[in-house]
Amino acid sequence: MRAHPLCSVLTLAFASITGSARADDLTLLERFNDSRVSLTSAIGTGSFVSSEFSDDPYFSQSLALEPRFLLAEQLFFGARFDMECELTEPNSPSTRRCSPSDLSLSFSALNLLRDPWLNGQVRGGLSLYLPTSLESRFNNTVVNLRASTGYSARFFDERLQVSLGVGLQKYLPTQITRGPDAGNADFPLILSRQSAISDGAAGSGGRLNDNWALSSSFFVGWQFFDQLSATISFGVYNYFRFTVPEDFSDPALSRTGRVDLTSGSLEVSYRLFDNLAFDFGVVSTQPAMTADNSSLRFPFYDFISPANNYTRWYLTAHLSY
């Protein structure tokens, strides 16, 4: 499965913001500091559209589990698993309401290098995605691998943080084309509203499986005071698909493919207690170009096709350890 773009951006930002105590001074349980459980309620822009071109309204709730363990100074092992359930009537190839994510396991180093000019830090990470999602089952995925790196710096008494990141992901399916095999007839839910289906496959697009993905992300955060902060995140995700052999039996199938997505979010966070925080924001994840490829879409809100629910408003409660 493709890791959801928003998760990539926010995980990058969260990792770069959070510090750590000296590993030798912590007990076993204290090494799990900053592990989180998050509950999110989201509503899609299609809920506000009423016309013959509209999809059904979209309202969902999701639960995310993010354990994190401090292995050594600035070196962490982490995992993430999400379950999102649509509370409105599903309008997708599947009648399922709930969609699990892939289970990700990762190692991250938050301070590989320090630059001598801005005192910024270079980070890096390796991730393994296990195929627990409907989309990965539909793609006949074995496992996905990801390597990432980034840079963060702080300014104005550390109130302003700026981060850049890049990632490279390798997909390892059992076949180069998407679609159910024997005994595997489920369909994915992600980005697969009925109005977005334009070919013979369901899901995030196209009949060919992804081979590689390149991501670039940008994050800016401002700390108003200890409890209140605001962030802007932007990511570009380029998916490069497998090439079909020349003698493939389906002449209508294109020989290769590529998909470009953007994801932009605006968010305000408030920490009520040491272990409880709330986020309110809007996130938009959609194709980078318009349907006729004539222009770029605005990355932070889908004004062109709001019925597709690419843009969602959300409220998240985080409980951390």
Image (spheres, rainbow, N blue to C red):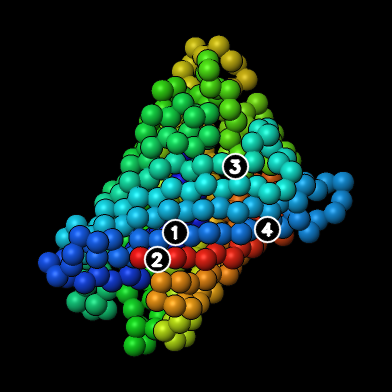
| Relative depth, front residue between 67 and 108 | 67
The answer to whether residue 258 is above or below residue 199 is: below
Mark 3, residue position? 98
Using the numbered discs, state the Cα–Cα distance from disc 1 to disc 2 in whole angstroms.
6 Å
**Distance (Cα) linking label 3 and label 1:** 18 Å
Task: State the image quarter where residue 143 is shown.
Answer: top left
In the rendering, which numbered label is found on residue 37? Answer: 1
Task: Name the one closer to the observer, 27 or 192.
Answer: 27
Q: Mark 3 or mark 1: which comes first in sequence?
A: 1
Kind of residue at disc 1: Val
Q: Mark 2 is on which residue type? A: Ser
Q: Distance between the residues labelled 4 and 3?
A: 15 Å
Of pointers 1 and 2, the one earlier in the residue sequence? 1
Q: Name the residue under label 4.
A: 43
Q: List x then y, in percent, for residue 251.
A: 60, 16
At x 24% / y 77%, what residue is drawn? 119
Quadrant location of the C terminus? bottom left
Q: Which amino acid does label 3 sit on?
A: Cys
Q: Is residue 55 above or below residue 318?
A: above
- Kindly identify the residue that appears in the image at 30 percent across and 49 percent down: 106
Q: Distance between the residues labelled 3 and 2?
A: 24 Å
Q: Report the amino acid beneath label 4.
A: Ile
- Callout in the foreground (4, 2): 2
Please tell me which residue lies in front, 301 or 43.
43
Instruction: Describe the element under mark 3 as helix, strand or loop.
Output: strand
Mark 3 crowdedness (10 Å alpha carbons): few <14, some 14-19, many ≥20: some
Q: Are marks 1 and 2 in contact (CB under 8 Å)?
A: yes
Q: Mark 2 points at which residue?
A: 320
Toward the right, the furthest residue is 52
